[in-house]
Image (cartoon, rainbow, N blue to C red):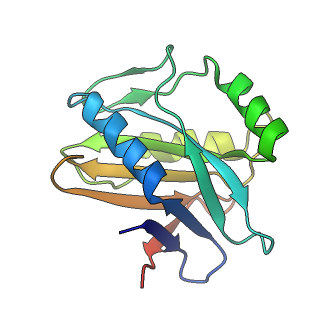
Amino acid sequence: MSSLHYKSIDNLFAIEVHESELNTMLHICSEAQGNETGGLLIGYYNDNHNCAIVTEVTGPSDDSASGKTWFYRGVCGLQKLLNTVWHRRRHYYLGEWHFHPEASPNLSGDDINAMNNIANSSKYNCPEPLLLIIGGNPELQWKVNVYVFPRKPKYITLKLAND
Ligand SMILES: [Zn+2]
């Protein structure tokens, strides 16, 4: 598998995650030793504005906290990083990712609330944030779900569209 490509049934939303970013996330999941973890998805949209290309992912910032079934994604250092990638490459915040250890990559109610807050927050300036969830065991068997949160409706599930 070289990259993951997910899209919504109506083709209005899609995301492309390259193998290097996927491997980075799986590695961060392994290091979390059975706790949740996560970070930001950074990249850009294609010219048609219907596909997000993830070019960089971050791990948990120093002020993040987590347990077996919860993750608080802190903010420490992230704005500085986003400023740097914007000035260097014009890439920007696309959304969030996190890990559900030994569990399905399905959304929780907390996940939906957190993402709807981001979609509606002027601080993020991101009206359609993406959420990528890795579930399972990062070394043996894992599964990725991806969701997009337009301000309305609440969220849309993107389907794996690899050939
Ligand atoms: Zn979650």
Taking the image as drawn, is residue 125 in sight? no
Residue at 73% x, 23% y is 80
Residue 50 % position (x, y):
70, 72
> Does residue 151 appear left or right of residue 160 in this picture?
right
Taking the image as drawn, is residue 13 in sight? yes
Residue at 49% x, 71% y is 5
> Does residue 11 appear left or right of residue 88 in this picture?
left
Residue 123 % position (x, y):
78, 32
Q: In this view, does 139 lie above or below 148?
A: above
Q: Is residue 133 above or below residue 60?
A: below
User: 143 and 117: which one is in front?
Assistant: 143
**Which residue reaches farthest top?**
63
Q: Looking at the rendering, which quadrant does residue 159 occupy? A: bottom left
Residue at 42% x, 52% y is 22
Q: In this view, does 4 lie above or below 82?
A: below
Q: How many marks can you see?
A: 0
Residue 150 % position (x, y):
67, 59
Residue 44 % position (x, y):
72, 56
Which quarter of the image is occupied by the C terminus?
Answer: bottom left
Residue at 35% x, 69% y is 1
> Does residue 161 appear left or right of residue 89 in this picture?
left
User: 139 and 95: which one is in front?
Assistant: 139
User: 107 and 73: which one is in front?
Assistant: 73
